[in-house]
Image: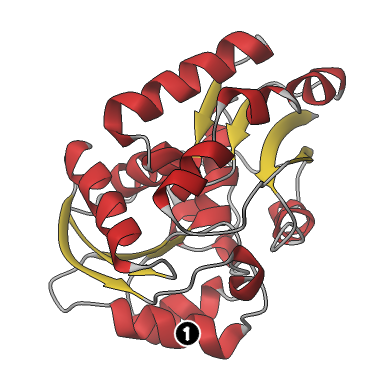
């Protein structure tokens, strides 16, 4: 059994995690602890507060008791909003508090892009433009070429959490770019786990989404690879360990 821990802000698309656990079809257990979201707003200061050490540390003890082998801060905007160096410090602080390997969704995107061999990416974001621009800047710091970045101007995670397959597909199509090797769909408040096959079929290229890469990152920290094609190209890379 591989137990993985996630700190998830508030309540929006947390049901993606039991769905992903089921789709992994292996001895992987995903333990979710909800953190206090504070103000539900895709605004820079609100996001920085949401990802503050005090808010993250509150859920760490519960994850330790669950037997988690690694912990990931399951929030894209609440990590990249600190910038490249600040996001590293956020993860180091989390690792010290948990006594476990730690990461965040922002780093998960950077690592997943490399994993699938993509050189150029397009961003299809739910965020306002200024927040989407920060994500693009973070990826560039990670050495990823961002060829386009589309923002949707959605302020609250609560609204994002109501989107279904039609809205997710429309977002990905709008954000795609002919020069992009992959499309990145940030925001862990967005339900995407059930839509990955449809997204990749529709766009004819890999699609990386926030909750998908977050789980993959936790598996990476635990030195596990699982073959789960229903979770997209990211989960079909060699070498494969299938249980």
Q: Is residue 87 left or right of residue 240?
A: left
Between 112 and 148, the one lying in front of the other is 148
Quadrant showing the C terminus:
top right
State the count of labels. 1
Task: Identify the residue position indicated by label 1 in the image.
Answer: 169
Q: Which residue: 60% across, 25% down?
A: 222
Left or right of 172, for residue 24: right
In the rendered structure, the answer to whether residue 192 lies left or right of residue 17 reads: left
Residue at left offset 66%, top offset 46%: 38
The residue closer to the viewer here, 155 or 125, is 155
Can residue 76 be seen from the camera position used here?
Answer: no
The front one of 95 and 157 is 157
Residue 90, above or below 18: above
Question: Residue 27 at what x, y percent from top left?
Answer: 79, 38
Residue 188 x, y percent position in the rendering: 57, 56
Residue depicted at 66% across the width and 68% down the height: 158
- For the residue pair 66 and 7, the one nearer the viewer reads as 7
Location of residue 180 by image quarter = bottom left
Q: Looking at the picture, how far across and down is residue 172, in whole percent?
A: 39, 78
Q: Is residue 115 visible to us here?
A: yes
């Amino acid at each position: 059994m591989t137990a993985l821990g996630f700190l998830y802000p508030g309540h929006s698309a947390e049901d993606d995690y039991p769905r992903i656990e089921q789709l992994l079809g292996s001895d992987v257990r995903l333990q979710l602890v909800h953190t206090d979201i504070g103000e539900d707003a895709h605004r820079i200061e609100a996001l920085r507060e949401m990802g503050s050490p005090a808010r993250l540390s509150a859920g760490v003890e519960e994850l330790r008791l669950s037997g988690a082998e690694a912990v990931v801060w399951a929030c894209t905007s609440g990590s990249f909003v600190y910038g490249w160096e600040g996001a590293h410090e956020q993860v180091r602080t989390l690792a010290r508090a948990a006594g476990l390997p730690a990461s965040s969704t922002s780093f998960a995107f950077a690592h997943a892009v490399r994993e699938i061999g993509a050189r150029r990416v397009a961003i299809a974001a739910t965020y306002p433009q200024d927040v989407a621009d920060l994500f693009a800047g973070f990826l560039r710091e990670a050495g990823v070429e961002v060829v386009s970045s589309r923002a949707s101007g959605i302020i609250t995670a609560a609204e994002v959490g109501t989107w279904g397959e039609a809205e997710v597909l429309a977002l990905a199509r709008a954000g795609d770019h002919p020069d992009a090797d992959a499309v990145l769909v940030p925001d862990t408040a967005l339900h995407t786990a059930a839509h990955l096959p449809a997204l990749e079929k529709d766009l004819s290229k890999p699609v990386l989404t926030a909750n998908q890469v977050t789980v993959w990152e936790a598996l990476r920290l635990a030195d596990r690879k699982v073959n789960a094609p229903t979770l997209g190209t990211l989960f079909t890379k060699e070498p494969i360990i299938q249980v």
